[in-house]
Amino acid sequence: MINFQNVINDIHNNLKSSENRGVVASYIPELEKQSAKSFGIFLKPINGENCHVGDWNTPFSIQSISKVLALSKAIVFENNKVWQRVDVEPSGNPFNHLSLLELEKGIPRNPLINAGAIVIADILVTHLKHPKQDFLDYVRNIAGDHTINYNLDVAKSEQNTGFKNFAAAHLLKSFKNLNNDVDTVLDFYFHQCALELNCKQLANAFYLFANAGKCINNKQHLSLIQVKRINAIMLTCGFYDEAGEFAFEVGLPGKSGVGGGIVALLPSNFVIVTWSPGLNAKGNSLLGMQALEQFTTKTKRSIF
Ligand code: GLU
């Protein structure tokens, strides 16, 4: 029987004094306030005790990780109709790349790149009566934690500087793949990305993807087939143009964000979250990738 707490303690010890911690994102100015020294790990097994080490209790900006949660809500509203507006292929490009969108006539490669996530945001704006509040309530519900909130300074900071997202949204609109107006959709999208959760809250929110669609309160939110699809998209598209590398090194479906968080999971087994704000050249948390590689190697738990 593996002692998971000892495993994550060892990993944290191995990495916590690393000199090379990557670079904290600054293109959203508010994110630059994060300390590159922060480093936390939280493991939530499907059966068994939670384990944690380091800064697991500090809330951070989940950024692109929110795209998976938004997708899970959009799928409940539109099920397979979603795939008429967004494809499911890895893009092999950075998250905010635009030329493919033009070439492929406004159908984004997948729902986890920015253009795809903006289409998903459009779907939610169409279906939710009070989009920002209703989406926040959904995340609070599946995480079983009503203290979760948006960081309004981060949302505003991105609103002021997210020029490429405005470009993507206008391009989508020109191809008639955005039903609501650009400002409304992006206001929702920037808030969604500005959700702040700690490692434990994030592990709880993602529990349903490892637990056949049932959240921590045992409520069925997604069917098995929907969970299968979302996990497949995380595996193939969850790490910008480093999804192949993440599968190769770690071997789990997951999603990263430029706030330095990574969530990964093994269906029917566990959810694991790491947070370290320093990013590698591809925009993924440098220590987080290393920690997860060590975790699946030491425990021999991966989908492969
Ligand atoms: N809100 C960020 C953006 O749209 C998300 C980026 C990310 O975490 O990948 O640029």
Image: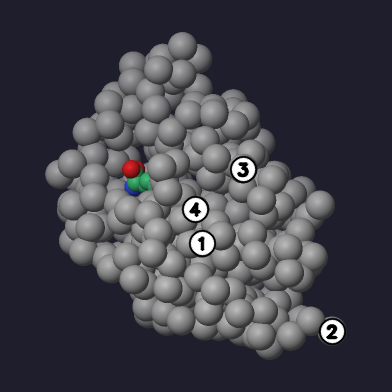
Crowd rating for badge 4 (residues with CA inside 10 Å; few <14, some 14–19, many 20+): many
Residues at marks 4 and 3, CA–CA distance in whole angstroms: 13 Å
User: Which residue in the protein does label 4 denote?
Assistant: 256
Q: Is mark 4 within 8 Å of ligand 1?
A: yes
- The picture places residue 76, in percent across and down from the top left corner, at 60, 50
Residues at marks 1 and 3, CA–CA distance in whole angstroms: 13 Å
Q: Number of numbered discs present?
A: 4
- Report the front residue among 170 and 92: 92
User: Which residue in the protein does label 1 denote?
Assistant: 288
**Amino acid bearing label 4:** Ser
Mark toward the start of the polypeptide (1 vs 4):
4
Q: Residue at x 25, y 58 (%)?
A: 31
- The picture places residue 201, in percent across and down from the top left corner, at 49, 75
Q: Residue at x 67, y 46 (%)?
A: 247
Residues at marks 1 and 4, CA–CA distance in whole angstroms: 9 Å
Mark toward the start of the polypeptide (2 vs 4):
2
Residues at marks 1 and 2, CA–CA distance in whole angstroms: 25 Å
Crowd rating for badge 3 (residues with CA inside 10 Å; few <14, some 14–19, many 20+): few
